[in-house]
Amino acid sequence: MAKTILVFIETRESKIRKSSIEALSAARRLAPENTLAAAVLGPCDDAATLAHYGAGQVYTVNSGSLASFSADMYSAGLNAIVEMVKPDYIAGSATIFGRELFGRLAAKLGRTPASDCVEMHWNNGEIKLVRPVYSGKARSTVSFRGDPPSLFTLRPNVFPADSPDVSRSCEVSAVEMAIQAGTASVTLVEVLKPDTAELDASEAQVVVSGGRAMKGPDNFEILRKLVSVIPNAALGASRAAVDSGWIDHHYQVGQTGKVVSPQLYIACGISGAIQHLAGMSSSKCIVAVNKDPEAPIFKVADYGIVGDLFEIVPKLTEEFKKLLAS
Ligand SMILES: Cc1cc2nc3c(=O)[nH]c(=O)nc-3n(C[C@H](O)[C@H](O)[C@H](O)COP(=O)(O)OP(=O)(O)OC[C@H]3O[C@@H](n4cnc5c(N)ncnc54)[C@H](O)[C@@H]3O)c2cc1C
């Protein structure tokens, strides 16, 4: 039976985020008979382009109190769209905002969300989802019971975004909603942007991470050199490197850092503690450089290089340079 899926679309600086396009594309691929709608909250310049990725209807809510993300205000806005659309499923991306929003909306609706899912299947008119549990040590398959709507979020970078079909268009409806300004329990005071234009590890196709073996902040330069020769690559780090003060927390990958799912993850001098694996084990290909052949990282690595990273990484950089130049 056909179902209605409402996908929450996250924006940054009024532009749709790639992870939301991935969620919309994944929802579209589920079953052709389903109805797909998109919900956009706050300012957005390109809401109409959501039709190119399969949205049959786009709902927008834009009031002053949605100018920046606030889980209170956004869950109220999204709930207003949910009441109108009455979807069977509400999907979104498991970004930092997505996780907070879906937790709050689920509480409002009296539901339990399935968060950070890495697989999605259509089974007899129902969605089945797979999500890593216990810091990625196991995977659980979940389906929903009870009345709709059911809520879930998808891990960024796991589901491919479709190519846009620019011949498609759909109606974009502005939903009027009186959200009382100043009622948010948390308000945005200031946005501190990183001083570099570096790619964020959670959106990169290749992540090169360094651990305690980097021995100090200056040595991260050899990883930055490798990052600089690979297109769509970003730098990452283990918590040991972050806690040592060698690199900002913004780069941390793991349970208490970012969850990344690049095509290629290169772990340099990282032992492979379970908390680190929680943030990168869904990478498509894992390469580990470690001088200890018994390091646990080799258990999850597709390719392992036993050796000193200070010798290996510059060689890798040269090889990438040659390969990508040809
Ligand atoms: C609640 C909690 C949350 C946590 N969250 C996170 C998290 O989000 N992310 C995270 O990363 N950790 C997290 N941790 C910490 C985690 O348990 C590990 O302590 C941490 O990941 C270890 O970092 P590391 O692998 O860089 O260091 P180590 O475990 O010290 O490993 C260093 C590795 O480098 C190798 N090495 C040394 N020299 C060289 C060299 N010259 N060349 C090549 N290899 C070399 C060694 O053989 C070793 O395997 C968390 C811990 C807790 C308790």
Image: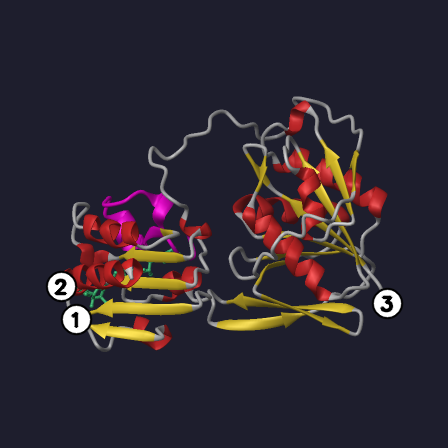
Residue 81, numbered label: none
Contact flag, marks 1 and 3 (Cβ < 8 Å): no
Of the two numbered discs 2 and 1 in the rendering, the one whose residue sits closer to the viewer:
2
Q: Answer above or below: position of 299 versus 75.
A: below
Q: Where does the magenta region start and end? A: 234-257
Q: CA distance from mark 1 to mark 3?
A: 56 Å
- Mark 1 or mark 3, earlier in chain: 3
10 Å neighbourhood of mark 2: few (<14), some, or many (≥20)? few
In the figure, is residue 102 to the left or right of 17? right
Residue at the spot of label 3? 1
Query: In this rendering, does residue 257 appear at all?
Result: no
Q: Amino acid at mark 1?
A: Gly
Query: Which of the pair 318/285 is nearer the observer?
Result: 318
Q: Answer above or below: position of 19 versus 270.
A: above
Q: Is mark 1 within 8 Å of ligand 1?
A: yes
Q: Quadrant of ligand 1?
A: bottom left
Query: Which of the pair 292/240 is nearer the observer?
Result: 292
10 Å neighbourhood of mark 1: few (<14), some, or many (≥20)? some
> Where does residue 194 sit, x and y in percent of width and height?
37, 35
Q: CA distance from mark 3 to mark 2?
A: 58 Å
Residue 240 location, quadrant: bottom left
Contact flag, marks 3 and 2 (Cβ < 8 Å): no
Query: In this rendering, does residue 31 appear at all?
Result: yes
> Where does residue 208 sit, x and y in percent of width and height?
31, 57
Q: Is residue 249 magenta?
A: yes
Residue at the spot of label 2? 311
Residue at the spot of label 1? 307
